[in-house]
Image (cartoon, rainbow, N blue to C red):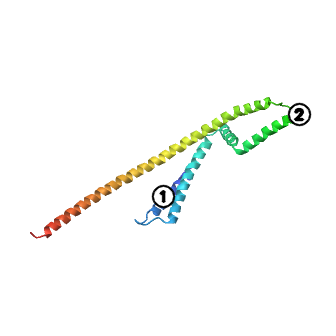
């Protein structure tokens, strides 16, 4: 990411942060409007999208052509089009070699077909494993990011909780002082 893009992203985040503060800075007892809620939700989705785009970009940079090829093969190998094409191929192969008026190049235990299927399985399994390893690495990155976000949220919650305890303590002190003042005022006001 260039310095110019980084600066623009920082400026956008600061602008968005100000908008969130404005959105959330409503009078006590007053609820956020639909517009405010949509605005905050949109910002959260954009932020999440930026993180996912950054993860995709980083993963694409660190991926070799063979890794990308493995991903494409694994995604095609686990799709309905592959299954339909493969079943069609198998049925065509068997019908071709069973019907009497065609040339039989692989007769009925279909040894050549078994060899082809074994080779396909032998090649497809490692490709799928490579793709799964790459996906596991991406999942690990995402879980680390989720942990960091959750940890930050927990820290903010703890800070808010400490602040609320301080406010509660201060209110209790104020109430005690008011009780003392009203208690001394009421005792001095009553004649003996």
Which quadrant would residue 166 be assigned to in this image? bottom left
Q: Name the residue at the left extreme.
A: 192
Residue 63 locus on image (x, y percent): 63, 40
- Residue 77, given in percent of the width and then of the height, sits at 70, 40
| Residue found at the far right of this picture | 101
Quadrant where the C terminus lies? bottom left
SS class, disc 2? loop
The residue carrying pointer 2 sits among few (fewer than 14), some (14 to 19) or many (20 or more) residues within 10 Å by Cα, namely: few
Query: Which numbered mark, 1 or 2, is in the foreground of this view?
Result: 2
Q: Using residue 42 as the reference point, say whether residue 105 is left or right of it.
A: right
Residue 161 visible from this viewpoint: yes
Q: Nearer the viewer, residue 36 or 7?
A: 36
The image shows a total of numbered marks equal to: 2
Q: Secondary structure at mark 1?
A: helix
90 or 135, nearer to the observer: 90
Q: Residue at x 58, y 39 (%)?
A: 136
Disc number placed over residue 103 in the picture, else none: 2
In percent of width and height, residue 141 lies at 54, 42
Which disc is residue 81 wearing? none
Q: Is 161 left, or right, of 140 in this rendering?
A: left
Q: Nearer the viewer, residue 111 or 146?
A: 111
Answer above or below: position of 63 versus 24: above
Give whichever of 76, 103 is nearer the camera. 103
Which residue is painted at 41% across and 66% down in the image? 29
The residue located at (48%, 58%) in the rendering is 17
* Horizontal arrangement in the rendering, residue 116 relative to residue 140 (left or right): right
- Dot 1 corresponds to which residue? 17
What percent of the width, then of the height, locates residue 88?
78, 41
Characterize the local packing of mark 1: few (<14), some (14-19) or many (20 or more) Cα atoms within 10 angstroms: some
* Measured Cα–Cα span from mark 1 to mark 2: 74 Å
Please report whichever mark, 1 or 2, sits nearer to the chain's N-terminal start: 1
């Amino acid at each position: 990411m260039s310095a110019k893009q980084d600066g623009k992203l920082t400026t956008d985040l600061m602008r968005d942060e100000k908008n969130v503060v404005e959105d959330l800075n409503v009078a006590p007892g007053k609820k956020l409007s639909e517009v405010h809620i949509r605005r905050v939700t949109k910002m959260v989705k954009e932020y999440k999208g930026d993180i996912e785009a950054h993860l995709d970009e980083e993963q694409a940079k660190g991926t070799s052509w063979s890794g990308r090829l493995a991903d494409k093969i694994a995604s095609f190998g686990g799709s309905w089009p592959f299954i339909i094409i493969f079943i069609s191929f198998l049925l065509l192969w068997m019908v071709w070699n069973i019907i009497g008026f065609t040339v039989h190049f692989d007769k009925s235990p279909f040894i050549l077909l078994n060899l082809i299927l074994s080779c396909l399985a032998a090649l497809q399994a490692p490709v799928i494993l490579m793709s799964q390893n790459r996906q596991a690495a991406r999942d690990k990155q995402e879980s680390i990011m989720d942990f960091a976000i959750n940890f930050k949220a927990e820290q903010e919650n703890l800070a808010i909780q400490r602040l609320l305890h301080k406010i509660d303590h201060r209110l209790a002190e104020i109430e005690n002082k008011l009780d003392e003042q009203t208690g001394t005022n009421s005792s001095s006001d009553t004649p003996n």
